């Protein structure tokens, strides 16, 4: 779970710092900075990793619900299904 948080936090920091700078540079020079594009691709991959790990965790929590007695079984299966669909859709 910590690895997913790192990807999400890196994306947030990038969007708050590098995105406005790149926009200013693009307005000033008329071209997107080269370093921005490569860093944007990296941060996008980190965010994709965050999403895959988040959906996988959702499936694992659904599986844990199946073994317990606090929630109905359909809720556990719903968590597994939605997490699996999320993993497939985000990768």
Image (spheres, grey):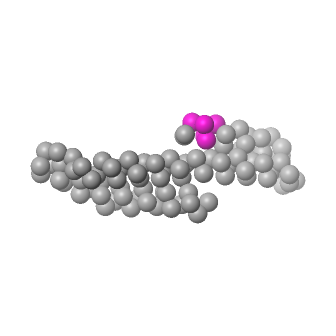
**Residue 44 image position (x, y, % from top left):** 42, 48
Q: Residue at x 77, y 41 (%)?
A: 77
Query: Foreground: 4 or 41?
Result: 41
**Residue 10 image position (x, y, % from top left):** 43, 60
Q: Residue at x 30, y 58 (%)?
A: 18
Is residue 87 rendered magenta in the image? yes
Majority secondary structure of magenta residues: helix
Above or below: residue 37 compared with residue 8: above
Q: Residue at x 54, y 40 (%)?
A: 90
Above or below: residue 78 compared with residue 60: above
Quadrant location, the N terminus = bottom right
Query: Foreground: 68 or 55?
Result: 55
Query: Foreground: 88 or 72?
Result: 88
Q: Is 85 left or right of 39, judged from the image as shown?
A: right
Q: Is 91 left or right of 85, judged from the image as shown?
A: left
User: From which residue to which does the magenta span run?
Assistant: 85-89
Residue 23 visible from this viewpoint: no
Query: Foreground: 38 or 57?
Result: 38
Q: Residue at x 67, y 52 (%)?
A: 57
- Residue 15 is drawn in which quadrant? bottom left
**Residue 67 image position (x, y, % from top left):** 86, 51
Residue 57 visible from this viewpoint: yes
- Residue situated furthest left in the rendering: 29
């Amino acid at each position: 779970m910590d690895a997913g948080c790192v990807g999400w936090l890196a994306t947030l920091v990038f969007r708050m710092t590098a995105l406005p700078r790149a926009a200013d540079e693009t307005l000033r020079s008329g071209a997107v900075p080269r370093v921005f594009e490569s860093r944007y691709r990296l941060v996008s991959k980190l965010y994709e990793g965050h999403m895959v790990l988040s959906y996988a965790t959702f499936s694992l929590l659904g599986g844990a619900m199946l073994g317990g007695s606090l929630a109905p079984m359909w809720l556990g299966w719903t968590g597994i299904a939605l997490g699996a669909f999320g993993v497939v859709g985000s990768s």
